[in-house]
Each structure stands twice: as C-alpha cells, then as structure tokens.
Image (cartoon, rainbow, N blue to C red):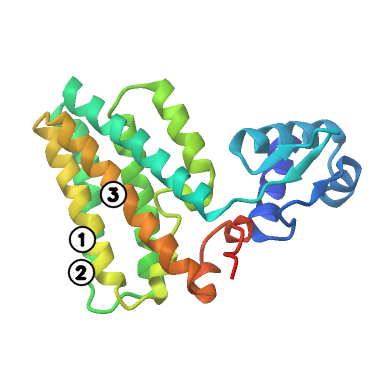
Amino acid sequence: MSQTVSALLQLRDLILSGDLAPGQRLQELAIVDRLGVSRTPVRAALVQLQEEGLVEANPSGGYAVRAFSEQEVNEAIELRGVLEGLAARLAAEKGVEPERLTPLKGCLTEIDTVIGAARLTLADFERYVELNERFHHALTALADSPMLARQIARAYALPFASPSGFVMVQAIQPQAHHILTIAQDQHRCVVEAIENREGARAEMIMREHARLARRHLELAMHDQDALRHVRGAALIAPRRA
C-alpha cells in the first residue's frame, strides 16, 4: 500500500469514527507524527478528503474536519437519489442486454434469502449491506456513463449518503424487516423498468428508493443509540433543543 493511500484510509477512519471532531483543525505536522508517514502523502490525502467533502479548507490555510447539518445530510441523500435515478433512466433508454441484468437478478435472489429469515441477525444485516452495495454499483454500471459514475462515487463518499448508510440503524428497529422488504421491492421494480425500457419509471423508483434513507435519518436523529450505528454520525450536528 502506498503512503498516500495509507494516509487517506487512516485519516478517513479517524474522521468517520469521531476521533477527529467536526471543526477540528488538521495540523499537517501533527498528522505526520500520528500516522507515521511523510508530509507529501498527508497533503495528497487532505486534498482527496476535501474532494470527498469530509474536510474543508480554512481561509487562513490548512484544513478542518467538516460538520454536517441534518438538512445537508438530507440534501446529500436526495442528490444520490437524483444521480442514481439518472443512471437507471439512461440504462432503460439505451437498452440493456439480458445477460447484463443477470448479476442484478442474482443479487436480488441472494437478498431474498437474507431477508426471508424469520428473525434477522447482525450477520444478516451485514450480508445485506454487502449485497445492497453490490446491487447499486451494478445498477450504476448499466448506464455506461463514466462521468455519471464518477459523480455517483462522490455522492457515496459521504457514508451517511451511501446506499447502505442507514441499514445498520434498522438492526435495532422493530420495523426493520418491513423496511427492508420495501427496499427490496423497489430493487426488483427498477430492474423490471430497465428491462422494459421504461426510463421515467426507473428514474422515479430510484429517487423514491433514496428517500427511504431519509426516513432512517429521521428515526436515528431521535435515537442516539441508533445514530451510533451510522458510519460518520459523529459529523452530523445534533439537533438544537
């Protein structure tokens, strides 16, 4: 692993875990000492994290860990839905060969097996996260648009805006099975819409699909125990009383 990649991964983890708090200034030399890498990789990592939206440049120089309001998180989720909706519409309008839909359908079958259990375990939720992310990445690829894929990857870089950002919150929610069933039905409907070349329908489904995450955010903001299951929750500013 290169020093730049190592610095990026370590810094990202420190930010998302809350070890580096929102608003905290990132002193280059202190980071070099903490990570055990040279200054050049640290600078490159900070530039990448700014691109991802996790840090912001200070007017006086340097960087600080970024904080997000609940409204900003909602907007990030909505943006992801718009971009994924566009990907689904492009795929439907261009037309997709049946064999390219096979991986998505296989993924749906595996998800059915996971959520078909009478009682979902933590391992089931972790497996769902893996399959859900695989489904969303495969869906994006169907659009055959590298430019769009890059923008979707940027939206995914904020963990609470990614397709699985709030899945683990459901692990402690009584309505978890019902919500996963709704999400899976939307997965199946968007594949059907793409297969039938129904662009507008495919786009609408993915935009609505993203709004499930907004419901999870609303639940989590009222339950600190649930919120700690969200990767990057330390960056979300608490509501004012």
Residue 133, image x and y in percent?
Answer: 38, 48
Quadrant position of residue 100: top left
* Residue at point 17%, 41% (across, down): 191
Mark-to-mark CA distance, 2 and 3: 20 Å
The amino acid at mark 3 is His
**Which image quadrant: the C terminus?**
bottom right
Residue 70, image x and y in percent?
Answer: 52, 55
Label 3 crowding class (10 Å Cα cut-off): few <14, some 14-19, many 20+? Answer: many
The amino acid at mark 1 is Asp
Residue 13, image x and y in percent?
Answer: 66, 53
Asked if marks 1 and 2 touch (Cβ < 8 Å), the reply is yes
Mark identifier at residue 116: 2
Disc 1 is placed on an element classified as helix
* Residue at point 70%, 38% (across, down): 56
Q: Which residue is situated farthest in the left direction here? A: 196
Disc 3 is placed on an element classified as helix
* Residue at point 38%, 55% (across, down): 213
